[in-house]
Image (spheres, grey):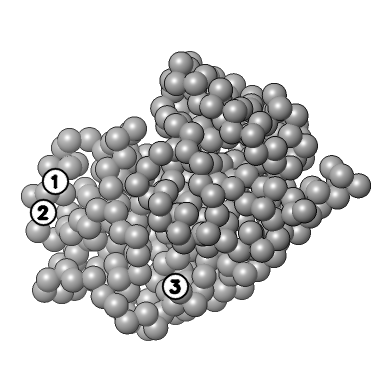
Amino acid sequence: MKVKLVIATTVPETLFTILRGQPRWLSEHFDVVCVTSPGLQNAQVREAEGVEVIEVPMSRGISPVKDLFSIMRMCKVLRDLKPDIVHSYTPKAGLVAMLSAFFLRIPIRVHTFTGLVFPTCSGLKRQLLITVDRLICFSATRVVPEGLGVAYDLSVNKVTGKTLEVIGHGNIAGVDVDYFCPSFSGRLEIGERLGFVFCFVGRLNRDKGIAELVRAFQKVSQPAKLIIVGELDQTAPIDDETISMIRSDSSIITTGFLSDIRPALAICDAVVLPSYREGFPNALLQAGAMAKPAIASDINGCNEIVKNGHNGLLVTPGSVESLLFAMNEFLHMDEGELLKLGNSARKMVVERFDQSTYRESLLKFYQERIDEAFH
């Protein structure tokens, strides 16, 4: 009998994009079941991963009544499945899955913090979010921060006293460096190419710094284009003024959600991620694998991937002036300087974040937890 592993995420998009291929690979070693909210992508996840996908509604926002219903539903699912391991990703899945697994005394309960919301909040909301994170940590037998920055925030804010173990060098899936490679030949159609092309990849969430990005872009010193890849995040959408600026600027191309972001990365000269907070951003890893230098905020996660002057530039979060300075720096670099930064980005991702290496580290992590629990 294989050990039964339940992977829980708040929304199916996480399984369809970031964790793509991981459940199928893990099913070679475990009996894998995925649990996530209802969504059109679940059918695609079932087909792509070859594993059972069970739907449990989970809302992203703060909603005690809905959360209680989700926990009751999750308890029923886990009671029927009788898993040996429950591993949750993202905040709401962590709350729902870890509490349910704790109530049912499932022996191995792992939660991965893919990013913390409370550091950018204040007052009562901050305290509420910290309390929820403490509850998740209390319910889990093992707490996994996605990166060293997340581990630091959990520790310094006394969210948990449990051992914090980053898997591999960080991130939750690693990067398929053969899939995301510089030789990819597809290109996004962006019309006439005038000068430098910047690219942003991510949910259109106000904490991603899109307002600053658009304002900085409109002040750059040379003709350029900006590609924005991602759909509007209804839980924390960008402001109406920024949306209007994006729509009225012919130099800004929006694509919405793309299941394959390689054509957008292939056509750009650099990626920009001016977030206020991150866990361990996949967009920077994937762009780096395609030898694209980056401009990113000097925050947890981003500064674990982007080394200033080595494979990109770091900027002050929330600062239009700092972002504009970095974008103009890129505009004035010659082709050789950009190529050097891009090659350094590719080299770092291959050496530290290759998907196959990460998966072996994840498997080793599970095997150690199994030995602790059952031997």
Total number of numbered discs in the rendering: 3
Q: Assess whether mark 2 and mark 3 are in contact (beta carbons under 8 angstroms).
A: no
Quarter-wise, where is residue 314 in the image?
A: bottom left
Furthest-right residue in view? Answer: 375
Residue 240 visible at all: yes
- Residue 195 located left or right of residue 357: left
Amino acid tagged 1: Met
10 Å crowding of disc 1: few (<14), some (14-19), many (20+): some
Q: Identify the residue at image location x=75%, y=29%.
A: 105
Residue 156 visible at all: no
Q: Give residue 201's position: percent from left, percent from top.
A: 34, 56
- Residue marked by disc 1: 245
Quarter-wise, where is residue 30 in the image?
A: bottom right
Q: Identify the residue at image location x=58%, y=67%.
A: 355
Amino acid tagged 2: Asp
10 Å crowding of disc 2: few (<14), some (14-19), many (20+): few
Question: From the viewer's perspective, is the residue at label 3 or at label 2 nearer?
Answer: 3
10 Å crowding of disc 3: few (<14), some (14-19), many (20+): many
State the CA–CA distance, disc 1 to disc 3.
31 Å
Q: Assess whether mark 2 and mark 1 are in contact (beta carbons under 8 angstroms).
A: yes
- Residue marked by disc 2: 249
Q: Secondary structure at mark 3?
A: loop
Amino acid tagged 3: Phe
Q: Secondary structure at mark 1?
A: helix
- Residue marked by disc 3: 180
From the viewer's perspective, is residue 133 above or below residue 54? above
Which of the two labelled residues, at mark 3 and mark 2, occupies the earlier sequence position?
3
Q: Give residue 109's position: percent from left, percent from top.
A: 70, 38
State the CA–CA distance, disc 1 to disc 2.
6 Å
Which of the two labelled residues, at mark 1 and mark 3, occupies the earlier sequence position?
3
Quarter-wise, where is residue 270 in the image?
A: bottom left
From the viewer's perspective, is residue 17 above or below residue 265? above
